Amino acid sequence: MADCSAAQADPAGGWTLPRLTVVNRTISDVTGRAVLLRGVNDNELAEYAQNDPSLPTVAPFNTGDFARMASLGFNVVRLNLSWSLLEPTPGAFDRGYVNKIHEAVDAAKSNGIYTLLDMHQDAWGPAVGTPKGKFCPPVLTKPGLGWDGAPAWATITDGWSTCAVGGVREISPAVARAFQNFYDNTRGIQDHLVATWGKLAAEFKSEPAVMGYDLLNEPNPGVRNPISEADQLGRFYQRAIAAIRVAERGGSPHLMVFEPSAIWSAFGIDATPPARYVGDPLSVFSPHLYNESINVITKLPSIEQGFQIARSAANRYGVPMWTGEWGWFGNPNTDAAQVNRFIDQLDRYQTGGAWWSWTQACGDPHTIRDGNTQRTNGNLNLTDCPSGAPLGFQTGFTGPLSRAYPRAMPGRVTNMDAHGFNGVGTGRIEAWYPGAARPQLTATNVQDLQLTQVSGGWRLTAQASGAYAVMSA
């Protein structure tokens, strides 16, 4: 066993971002390495309803944020996009907005970060908020907020109430009806989103640093029973995947990330779309694992049970599991242990995910309002409200989130935990280690190990052959 602590730095080295694929139910790259994608959601390019005219709904888009993400060891950003901005009028494809997406992808790439293009929505879209002064009946106790997603012209509520039970955004008749009209393709609105996906995929068909496409964030089930709602969601996924694959001709295929409905985020389980609709060989199952944070029953399923349930569902599909959202733990001074437990499970299941979220503006509908005070919650970058002044990282969360991990491992991963990783294969290893102190490591069947100090930590590169291991000394 060799002592690697004295390995020389590589002044010319850097992270590599080969195109991603799927091999044996594992997200891999085309060089034959298993790839762990760990990072964060970024909503700076999303459009939220302006529920408070005096407050911005998103933080200003800043390409410098990607360097700060990289300083935490992140290698993926789930970039939240809005259909309302992509297609502001029927048939449009807003070139200015698409150019911003290109700018974000390029900036992420230059910092060693893959981008997942996420068609984001919450509670259908900005146009389903309850108008000011509108009376809500006793059962539908609170006015509904406008959120993000679909354009107003694709919001068909048939006059159903925009008020919500207990103020819960998904339990609104208008939201459910708007989604049902989408699934039923009323006035061709589903056709529009399918076509928009094709246009967007054509833009990035030759970009290996795009991880793939998250087809629809936390879709509401509409007004059908659980089995029927899962079927209609699956049929949309099938159409979107087909349109994307046509658009990618002449380029390369990307990962197809599909989700269960928003019920999974609330309860930790849900009926899932039938496998026949998501049989693409590069499909990835992506439930949002909010166990022990915002699940309706706080401790059930537990973090560990949530992973078991999600992995079992992915196994039934025969695809990788990757969680596109997790986090939303309240107090970084008390909840860091839960974050570490969650990352322990990422290691155990040899997968990754994206924390919700990077930053949050004071006018974001996620912002918690308590009487006359407001506070952002769950995001890594603290914001003072209502001034909007940035207050820096929530270090209680960024500490565990920046834990060491292997970004890419050749061949087959046999084990990984907080102490190191093992695998079997031949090729280049890339791994992240946080902090200013040089990592003290031991390795087996690893050659040319080099440690390069980078912003926030260290980059490890090495060549593995056979049954290899890299462990903390």
Image: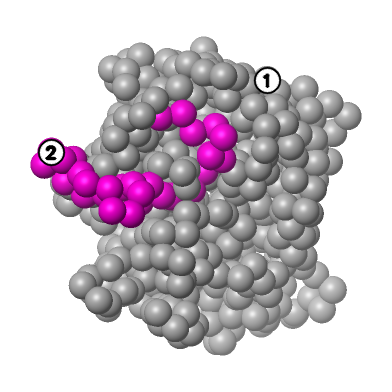
Which label sits on residue 451? none
Q: Can residue 466 be seen in this view?
A: no
Q: Determine the CA span between mark 2 and mark 1.
A: 42 Å
Q: How many residues crowd mark 2 within 10 Å: few (<14), some (14–19), many (20+)?
A: few
Q: In which quarter of the image is residue 338?
A: bottom left
What residue is shown at x 84% (from left), y 26% (from top)?
A: 249
Please state which of residues 157 and 193 is positioned toward the viewer in this rendering. Answer: 157
Please check the rendered image and state whether residue 221 is part of the magenta-colored stretch, yes or no: no
Residue furthest front as drawn: 133
Going by the numbered disc 2, the residue's amino acid type is Val
Going by the numbered disc 1, the residue's amino acid type is Ala
Q: In which quarter of the image is residue 33?
A: top right
Q: Is residue 362 visible?
A: yes
Judged by depth in the image, the label closer to the viewer, 2 or 1, is 2
Please, what secondary structure does the residue beneath circle 2 have? Answer: loop
Label 2 belongs to which residue?
139
Measured from the top left, where is residue 446 in percent x and y? 67, 60
Measured from the top left, where is residue 368 in percent x and y? 30, 66
Q: In this view, does 95 lie above or below 462?
A: above
Region of the chain picked out in magenta, as a range: 129-157
Please check the rendered image and state whether residue 144 is part of the magenta-colored stretch, yes or no: yes
What residue is shown at x 52% (from left), y 43% (from top)?
A: 149
Q: Is the magenta stretch mostly helix, strand or loop?
A: loop
Label 1 belongs to which residue?
242
What residue is shown at x 77% (from left), y 53% (from top)?
A: 96
Please state which of residues 258 and 229 is positioned toward the viewer in this rendering. Answer: 229
Placement of the N terminus among the 4 image quadrants: bottom right
